[in-house]
């Protein structure tokens, strides 16, 4: 299908798939070791470097796409650094091959439905001292609870509307390498992180995902998380595949593709409603 170093991979058996789903609903994340081989990892890193450093791709703007640039910059105090490769499917066949690789698709089907949809793919290239260090959930709270309520009622399992498969492309062995950190169970809080420095949920503090290149970990966007600072002298590479429930894609994606009649000049407010501007 794609002439790339990416293999087809193999889906997990039914028991392992179901256990992964249960772990995801319990903790809000799941670490799965040894999925990609080292040739795949090396090819993805090389492709990322080639594209992020390409003098034509680096400055290119993509106003017609959700992400406005192929290369998102990290804005530091003194310098801007190329940080995240966006809109990857348009750049190289290796990326659609990764979207289709197993066990990614079968896990996505188990978590968000057999007719799940693509909703994003990125590669983060963390130079030393570059990270998304703040504790956060991705996007908005899906099911917020009132301030006086501590969490969702026990036994209520919030649905996963979309999720991320994080794919380690470098070893992340020690805290200085900038591991992703999660607060277990916090996806059941219905709240934003309760402490900007050291959040805690029901006695659980931050857990670091120490992993090897080729490992993956699944992430509920409502689980409190951050990237710890990369204080080493190494570059940290992390790829992301994102999959969503079908109805959200249909409802919020396809509608935005309906064009206005030729010659109609849309005011700013209408452009925003149509998703054409922020």
Image (cartoon, rainbow, N blue to C red):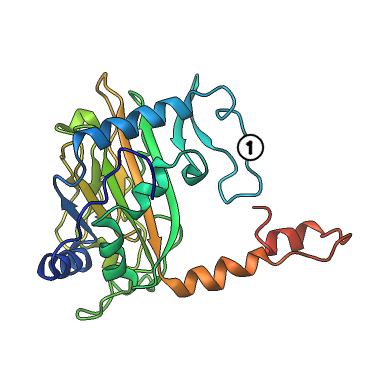
Front residue of this view, candidates 157 and 70: 70
**Residue name at image x 48 percent, y 23 percent:** 53
Q: Position of residue 83 (x, y in %)?
A: 44, 32
As helix, strand or loop, the secondary structure at mark 1 comes to loop
Residue at 53% across / 72% down in the picture?
Answer: 250
> Which residue sits at x=56%, y=68%?
252
Q: Which residue is mark 1?
A: 61
Left or right of residue 95: residue 186: left
Q: Position of residue 8 (x, y in %)?
A: 27, 51
Q: Is residue 234 left or right of residue 207?
A: right
Q: Position of residue 13 (x, y in %)?
A: 13, 66
Report whether residue 53 is seen: yes
- Classify residue 147 as left or right of residue 177: right
Res. 137 in view: no
Residue 197 falls in which quadrant of the image?
top left
Q: Quadrant of residue 103?
A: bottom left
Image coordinates of residue 47 in percent, x first then y, are 39, 31
Quick check: 73 above or below 101? Answer: above
């Amino acid at each position: 299908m794609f002439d790339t170093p990416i293999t087809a991979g193999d889906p997990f058996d039914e028991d392992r798939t179901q256990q992964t789903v249960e772990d995801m609903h319990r903790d809000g994340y799941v670490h799965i070791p040894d999925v990609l081989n080292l040739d795949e990892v090396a090819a993805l890193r090389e492709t990322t470097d080639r594209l992020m450093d390409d003098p034509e791709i680096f400055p290119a703007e993509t106003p017609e796409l959700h992400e406005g640039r192929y290369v998102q910059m990290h804005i530091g105090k003194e310098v801007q650094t190329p940080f995240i490769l966006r809109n990857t499917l348009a750049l190289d066949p290796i990326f659609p091959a990764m979207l289709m690789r197993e066990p990614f698709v079968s896990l996505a089907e188990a978590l968000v439905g057999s007719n799940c949809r693509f909703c994003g793919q990125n590669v983060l290239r963390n130079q030393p001292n570059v990270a998304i260090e703040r504790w956060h959930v991705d996007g908005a709270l899906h099911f917020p609870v009132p301030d006086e309520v501590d969490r969702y009622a026990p036994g209520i399992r919030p649905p996963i509307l979309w999720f991320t498969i994080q794919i380690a492309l470098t070893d992340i062995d020690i805290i200085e390498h900038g591991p992703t950190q999660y607060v277990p169970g916090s996806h059941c809080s219905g709240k934003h992180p309760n402490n900007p420095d050291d959040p805690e949920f029901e006695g659980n503090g931050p857990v670091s995902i120490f992993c090897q290149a080729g490992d993956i970990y699944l992430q509920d966007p409502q689980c409190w998380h951050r990237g710890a600072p990369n204080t080493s002298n190494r570059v940290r590479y992390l790829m992301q595949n994102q999959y969503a429930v079908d109805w959200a894609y249909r409802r919020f994606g396809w509608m935005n593709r309906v064009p206005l009649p030729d010659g109609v000049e849309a005011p700013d407010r209408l452009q925003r409603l149509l998703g054409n501007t922020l």
